[in-house]
Amino acid sequence: MNDKEKSLAVEKLLKNKLKNISIGELEDKIGKVISESVGEDYLCTISDVKYSLFSGAEFKIKVELTYNEEE
């Protein structure tokens, strides 16, 4: 591996693509998966998002049953 390839590999490793994901979209999708699995409507809230240097992330997820007056 030459120097140019090494620098490109390091750049790719250091670029955290998770920062491009919408937190709101992620909350909606997690809530939908849980709702479909359980059979009731659930809401997901993500907080305290911390991105790591090496393409990772750590965050808190809160999932709660939603109340629907129509049911």
Image: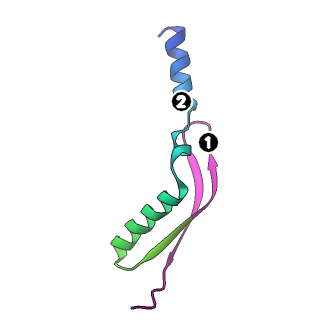
Report the Cα–Cα distance between label 2 and label 1.
Answer: 11 Å
Number of marks present in the image shown: 2
Picture coordinates of residue 45 (x, y %)?
Answer: 56, 67
Picture coordinates of residue 20 (x, y %)?
Answer: 53, 44
Mark 2 neighbour density, 10 Å: few (under 14) some (14–19) many (20 or more): few
The residue sitting at 40% across, 69% down in the picture is: 34
Q: What numbered label is drawn on residue 44?
A: none
- Amino acid carrying mark 1 in the image: Ser
Picture coordinates of residue 23 (x, y %)?
Answer: 54, 56
Can you say whether 46 is above or below 17 in the image? below
**What secondary structure is found at the residue carrying circle 2?**
helix
Residue extent of the magenta highlight: 46-71
Mark 1 neighbour density, 10 Å: few (under 14) some (14–19) many (20 or more): few
Q: Which of marks 2 and 1 is nearer the N terminus?
A: 2
**What secondary structure is found at the residue carrying circle 1?**
loop
Q: In which quarter of the image is residue 70?
A: bottom left
Q: Does the magenta stretch include residue 55?
A: yes
Q: Does the magenta stretch include residue 31?
A: no
Can you say whether 64 is above or below 61 in the image? below
Q: In which quarter of the image is the C terminus?
A: bottom left
The residue sitting at 42% across, 61% down in the picture is: 29
The residue sitting at 51% across, 39% down in the picture is: 17
In the picture of the structure, the residue carrying the numbered disc 1 is: 52
- Which residue sits furthest top? 2
In the picture of the structure, the residue carrying the numbered disc 2 is: 13
Picture coordinates of residue 55 (x, y %)?
Answer: 54, 39
- Amino acid carrying mark 2 in the image: Leu
Can you say whether 26 is above or below 41 in the image? above
Q: As drawn, is 29 to the left or to the right of 18?
A: left
